[in-house]
Image (spheres, rainbow, N blue to C red):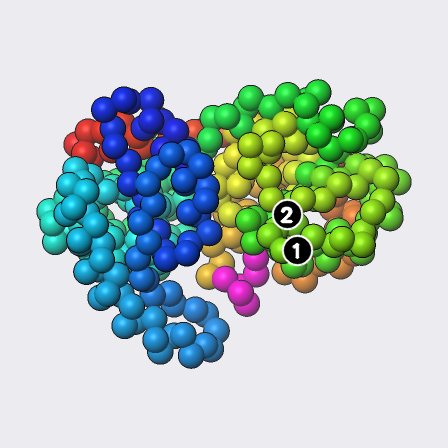
Amino acid sequence: MAVTEELKKHKDVELLYIGSINGIEQNLIEKVSVKYNGIYCGKFRRYFSFQNFIDPFKIPIGIIQAYSILKKFQADVVFSKGGFVSVPVVVAAKLLKIPIILHESDAIPGLANRICFKFANKICLGLEESKKYIGASARKIIVTGNPIRSFLKDGDKQIGYKLTGLNKFRPVILVMGGSQGALQVNNLVGKSLDELLKRFQIVHIRGRGNLDIGLHKTGYIQYEFLDEYLPHVYAIADLVVSRGGANSLAEIAYLKKKALIIPLGTNVSRGDQIENAKLFSRKFGWNVLFEDVSREDFINAIEKAFKEHVKLGVVGKNGAGAIANLILNKGK
């Protein structure tokens, strides 16, 4: 979305987004008037699933679909942010000899991007520390920073307070678990709510389908998802509680907010969020909670994070402009 925002400043650029069939990103992309095409893609799961036996057969189908889409669209360049839908698209682009620009947000590259690195003309990184994980020539790699939607800086506190109905005289905590929500974080908030509301107000983004319709308390407001209103909620937030996704952390850093990070553990992830959390906490002075977190740990960590003097002089880098320029120049 951030890169699309930059590219759309150029009137002669035509954009096409290739995602998975019925992908959750389709509505977001179509909202900004970008055409969406869905393809089949295989996904490697870190747990047993019969889909693991079926998905490998989807990849060649996806390559054929992507090849046809790219050829018909007459694409001049392909930009990929990773994820398993990117593999068929990147392979198809290579077959068609279309320049490929990749971007890796996380400290540790994901499997899909590691597969795609060998096909790339240019590899953009969100973090300098990711270089050591990439077996590619230095001329291919450029540290751009993570792309951030610039409209996030346009938040208005008055609109934020009006939207949420919160009191501007008490501190506000914004809790986010990503578009799918975060069960662990949602449960921690539920267990700690009465204690936290003695001092704070809470805006809680619970994820799609995760609203607790029976939970109504003064000073607490919950949403499934926020898009165009997110800048206004960021504007009133004194502290942000987030998972360790690199894009979310980059946004929080860009907005110079205090943060408490609760990364996904290695039992349900490849450990990328833990590495992201360590890097961002060192750079910005944020607090981190790892693995199993109790109610008491959560409350104490919020109190500590709120009191911390974060390194507000360090500015989070927005890589959207640099990435867009590379795309416009076809990676040259």
The quadrant in which residue 29 appears is top left
Q: Secondary structure at mark 1?
A: loop
Does residue 226 appear in the picture of this structure? yes
Tag 1: amino acid: Asn
Looking at the picture, how far across and down is residue 267, in whole percent?
55, 67
Residue at screen point 61% across, 51% down: 207
Instruction: Please tell me which of labels 2 and 1 falls first in the chain.
Output: 1
Confirm whether the magenta stretch covers residue 264: yes
Residue at screen point 33% across, 22% down: 9
Note whether 45 is above or below 308 in the view shown: below
Residue located beneath label 1 in the image: 210
Name the one closer to the observer, 294 or 25: 25
Residue at screen point 82% across, 38% down: 219
Q: Tag 2: Cα neighbours inside 10 Å, few (<14), some, or many (≥20)?
A: some
Name the one closer to the observer, 288 or 11: 11
In the image, 16: left or right of 249? left
> Can you say which quadrant of the picture contains the C terminus?
top left
Does residue 284 appear in the picture of this structure? no
Cα–Cα span, label 2 and label 1: 7 Å
Q: Tag 1: Cα neighbours inside 10 Å, few (<14), some, or many (≥20)?
A: some
Q: Secondary structure at mark 2?
A: loop
In the image, 144: left or right of 217? left
Tag 2: amino acid: Glu
Residue located beneath label 2 in the image: 224
In the image, 47: left or right of 322? right
Answer whether labels 2 and 1 touch (C-beta < 8 Å): yes
Q: Which residues are magenta?
A: 263-269
Looking at the picture, how far across and down is residue 248, in whole percent?
53, 41
Note whether 271 is above or below 203 in the view shown: below
Q: Main secondary structure of the magenta part?
A: loop
Name the one closer to the observer, 146 or 297: 146
